[in-house]
């Protein structure tokens, strides 16, 4: 006869859940849903497509949050019943079912707990991600494309809308760089821990057989800012170049010179956009990304000045923040948090939540 006692674990979960509910503020979520539902029901909602998408996306996100909280409340009650039934049945299968449900609830609670740590000024914003191939030649260009697919797959798994703004293809394989938006609440707060230098070690499919190749790619994450928050950019500070959009292998995406490259002369920041249909749309999208980068640069400079006055000048991120090793063994390891997995193919297919959660907890503890 099996006697299952999970009372301590369930009590701990209820205590943690109470703290999480207080931070997430269920009343505020409910009020947001009511406000957004009213906005979503407006007859002229889709007259402004961009605003309509923001409203419906925000509504979906808040409804999902509330549903998750309600689900945990219900499942905690059900778990106690499940434990009672398992003890009445007295068999291992019933006990294992209760343990599996406990593990599932602990995982879900961990995800919600991480969300409560996203309290930075721009954490609630959508994100603009830029990936650039670094040292390593054609392998680095291929690695940059692998990372692009990895983040887009991660967004797809979470049903987050994405929009690729610009991609510069390499001559032989892969990409030199890419910039894309992930338009979901808290995308910046969540993905900001992915910024830094990523390193790939593998048997190169492009070089001599039997030789390991190390290559690098840089990931930059900035918050996508609303017009009201935007940094003023005088026309005299920018140079705008127009060129013809191109795809892999030099293929023309369209036959008009609609792609736009904006260079911010004081800082040297360059932003391109070629995936919109018109030059006006590409210019607006590129300017928005430039404003986001300038705003983040301004915040970083302010933070650096404060640290200098405090006598504590330390880099927040190392040069290499994560290694992806495909040979001679299989492992992906974050060098800041020591979080690691032994299945790189899953990671490259967008299974990043473990790394992101560990990174957010690490960042919170480091500050």
Image (cartoon, helix red, strand yellow):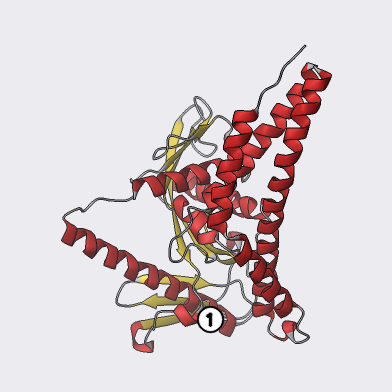
Q: Which residue is mark 1?
A: 284
Picture residue at 55% right of the left edge, 60% below the top: 187
Picture residue at 45% right of the left edge, 45% below the top: 361
- Whether residue 170 is visible to the viewer of this picture, yes or no, is no
Residue 204, position as x, y percentages in the image: 51, 36
On the image, which quarter does residue 277 sit in? Answer: bottom right
Which of these two is toward me, 269 or 101? 101
Picture residue at 59% right of the left edge, 29% below the top: 8
Residue 130, position as x, y percentages in the image: 48, 60
Image: 171 above or below 287: above
Picture residue at 67% right of the left edge, 23% below the top: 5
How many numbered callouts? 1
Residue 254, position as x, y percentages in the image: 65, 75
Q: Secondary structure at mark 1?
A: helix
Q: Which residue appears farthest toward the right when viewing the image?
A: 89
Which of these two is toward me, 1 or 129? 1
Quarter of the picture holding the N terminus: top right
Image: 335 above or below 52: above
Binning the other alpha carbons within 10 Å of mark 1 as few (below 14), some (14 to 19) or many (20 upward) gives: some
Image: 180 above or below 78: below
Residue 65, position as x, y percentages in the image: 66, 57
- Whether residue 236 is visible to the viewer of this picture, yes or no, is yes
On the image, which quarter does residue 267 sit in? Answer: bottom left
């Amino acid at each position: 006869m099996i006697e299952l006692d999970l009372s301590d674990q369930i009590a701990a979960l209820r205590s943690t859940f109470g703290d999480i509910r207080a931070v997430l503020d269920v009343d505020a979520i409910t009020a947001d849903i009511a406000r957004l539902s009213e906005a979503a029901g407006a007859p002229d909602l889709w007259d402004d497509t961009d605003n309509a998408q923001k409203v419906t996306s925000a509504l979906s996100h808040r409804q999902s949050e509330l549903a998750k909280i309600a689900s945990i409340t219900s499942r905690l009650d059900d778990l106690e019943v499940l434990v009672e039934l398992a003890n009445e049945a007295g068999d291992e299968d019933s006990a294992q079912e209760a343990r599996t449900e406990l593990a599932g609830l602990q995982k879900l609670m961990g995800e919600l707990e991480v969300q409560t740590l996203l309290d930075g000024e721009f954490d609630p914003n959508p994100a603009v991600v830029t990936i650039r191939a670094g040292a390593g030649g054609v392998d680095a260009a291929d690695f940059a494309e692998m990372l692009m697919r990895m983040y887009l797959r991660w967004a797809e798994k979470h049903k987050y809308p994405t929009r690729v703004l610009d991609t510069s293809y390499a001559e032989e394989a892969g990409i030199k760089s890419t910039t894309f938006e992930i338009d979901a609440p808290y995308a910046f707060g969540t993905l900001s821990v992915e910024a830094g230098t990523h390193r790939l070690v593998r048997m190169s499919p492009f070089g001599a057989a039997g030789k390991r190749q190390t290559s690098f790619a840089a990931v930059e994450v900035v918050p996508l800012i609303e017009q009201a928050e935007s940094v003023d950019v005088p026309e005299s500070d920018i140079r705008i170049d127009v060129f013809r959009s191109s795809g892999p292998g030099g293929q023309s995406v369209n036959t008009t010179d609609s792609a736009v490259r904006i260079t911010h002369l004081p800082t040297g920041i360059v932003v391109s956009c070629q995936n919109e249909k018109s030059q006006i749309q590409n210019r607006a999208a590129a300017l928005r990304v430039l404003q986001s980068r300038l705003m983040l640069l301004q915040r970083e400079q302010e933070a650096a000045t404060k640290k200098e006055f405090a006598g504590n000048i330390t880099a927040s991120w190392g040069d290499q923040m994560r290694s992806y090793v495909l040979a001679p063994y299989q492992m992906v390891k974050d060098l800041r948090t020591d979080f690691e997995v032994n299945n790189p193919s899953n990671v490259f297919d967008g299974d990043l939540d473990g790394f992101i959660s560990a990174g957010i907890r690490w960042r919170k503890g480091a500050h």
